[in-house]
Image (cartoon, rainbow, N blue to C red):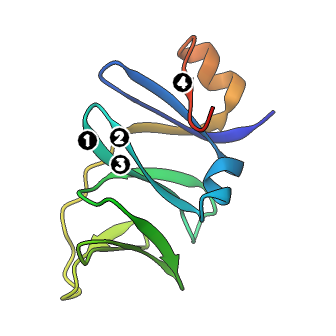
């Protein structure tokens, strides 16, 4: 009955358990199809989400997620140091229970295992 985020792109089908995301500080950087992706828990909806980024580190600070390189994620939008929004690209994703993702994508990877 575990809940989390299922992400798929190209040949990757990966499930991120909610508890694992929380244990990693509510934000983490992973790689999917040779692209870096921020996996995080949205601070407004308390649900996991993903966005492609060009960063190596992410940390929760107050009501935003700070990325190295000067970008921040605020209310689901990437913004620069100047406060201006940046384009956002997201992988295909779904907030789901583990069994639902595993039935849709048999044999998926599970992040952290």
- Mark 2 Cα-neighbour bin, 10 Å: few <14, some 14–19, many ≥20: few
Distance between the alpha carbons at the discs numbered 2 and 3: 6 Å
Q: Position of residue 103 (x, y in %)?
A: 63, 14
Say left or right for 24 vs 88. Answer: right
The residue where tag 4 is placed is: 109
- Mark 1 Cα-neighbour bin, 10 Å: few <14, some 14–19, many ≥20: few
Q: Are marks 4 and 2 in contact (CB under 8 Å)?
A: no
Q: Are marks 3 and 1 in contact (CB under 8 Å)?
A: yes
Distance between the alpha carbons at the discs numbered 2 and 1: 5 Å
The residue under the point 57% across, 70% down is 43
The residue under the point 66% across, 58% down is 22
The residue where tag 1 is placed is: 35
Q: Above or below — where is 70 with respect to 27?
A: below
Chain-order first, disc 4 or disc 3:
3
Q: Nearer the viewer, residue 93 or 22?
A: 22
Q: Position of residue 90 (x, y in %)?
A: 32, 47
The residue where tag 3 is placed is: 37
Q: Nearer the viewer, residue 100 or 68?
A: 68
Q: Quadrant of the C terminus?
A: top right
Q: Are marks 4 and 3 in contact (CB under 8 Å)?
A: no
Distance between the alpha carbons at the discs numbered 3 and 1: 6 Å
The residue where tag 2 is placed is: 31
The residue under the point 26% across, 41% down is 35
Q: Are marks 2 and 3 in contact (CB under 8 Å)?
A: yes
């Amino acid at each position: 009955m575990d809940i989390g985020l299922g992400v798929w792109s190209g040949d990757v089908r990966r499930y991120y358990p909610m508890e694992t995301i929380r244990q990693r500080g509510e934000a983490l950087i992973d790689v999917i199809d040779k692209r870096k992706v921020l996996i995080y828990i949205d601070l407004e909806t308390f649900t996991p989400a993903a966005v492609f980024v060009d960063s190596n580190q992410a940390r929760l600070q107050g009501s935003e997620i700070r990325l190295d390189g000067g970008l921040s994620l605020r209310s689901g939008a990437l913004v620069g140091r100047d406060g201006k929004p940046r384009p956002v690209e997201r992988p295909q994703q779904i907030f789901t229970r583990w069994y639902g993702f595993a039935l849709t994508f048999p044999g998926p990877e599970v992040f952290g295992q």
